[in-house]
Image (cartoon, rainbow, N blue to C red):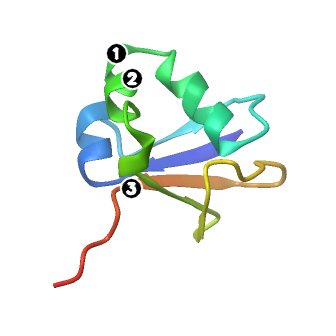
Amino acid sequence: MIDVLYFAWVRERIGLPKERVETSAATVAALVDELRAREDRYAAAFADTSALRVALDQELSSFDAPLAGVREVAFFPPMTGG
């Protein structure tokens, strides 16, 4: 089980701040594919992954990163200065 956290408009589209997900995905990209296949709201939230960032156990990571040993995955839009 992995804790998946959603922030900003990702949370708004999915309707949840976080959830526990049982997954066999080996990478973040594979997890995203699994989530997309769940329901339209997930498909909408993950339609354009170039507009998203991901952190694994609170460390900025990439979508091709492995999930082995990861406890938490967070999805959020890029941070902007200001």
Question: Type of residue at label 3?
Answer: Phe
**Residue drawn at 24 percent across, 47 percent down:** 9
Question: Type of residue at label 2?
Answer: Ala
Q: Judge the density around disc 2: few (<14), some (14-19), many (≥20) Cα neighbours within 10 Å.
A: some
Q: CA distance from mark 1 to mark 2?
A: 5 Å
Q: Mark 3 or 1 closer to N-term?
A: 1
Q: Is residue 65 left or right of residue 56?
A: right
Q: Position of residue 38 (x, y in %)?
A: 49, 16
Q: CA distance from mark 3 to mark 1?
A: 18 Å
Image quarter hosting the N terminus: top right
Which element carries disc 2, helix, strand or loop?
helix
Which element carries disc 1, helix, strand or loop?
helix
Q: Position of residue 34 (x, y in %)?
A: 60, 23
Residue assigned mark 1: 40
**Residue furthest left as drawn:** 82
Q: Is residue 62 left or right of residue 27?
A: left
**Residue drawn at 52 percent across, 26 percent down:** 35
**Residue drawn at 32 percent across, 44 percent down:** 10
Q: CA distance from mark 3 to mark 2?
A: 15 Å
Disc on res. 52: none
Judge whether residue 15 can be spotted in this image: yes
Q: Judge the density around disc 3: few (<14), some (14-19), many (≥20) Cα neighbours within 10 Å.
A: some
Residue assigned mark 2: 43
Disc on res. 76: 3
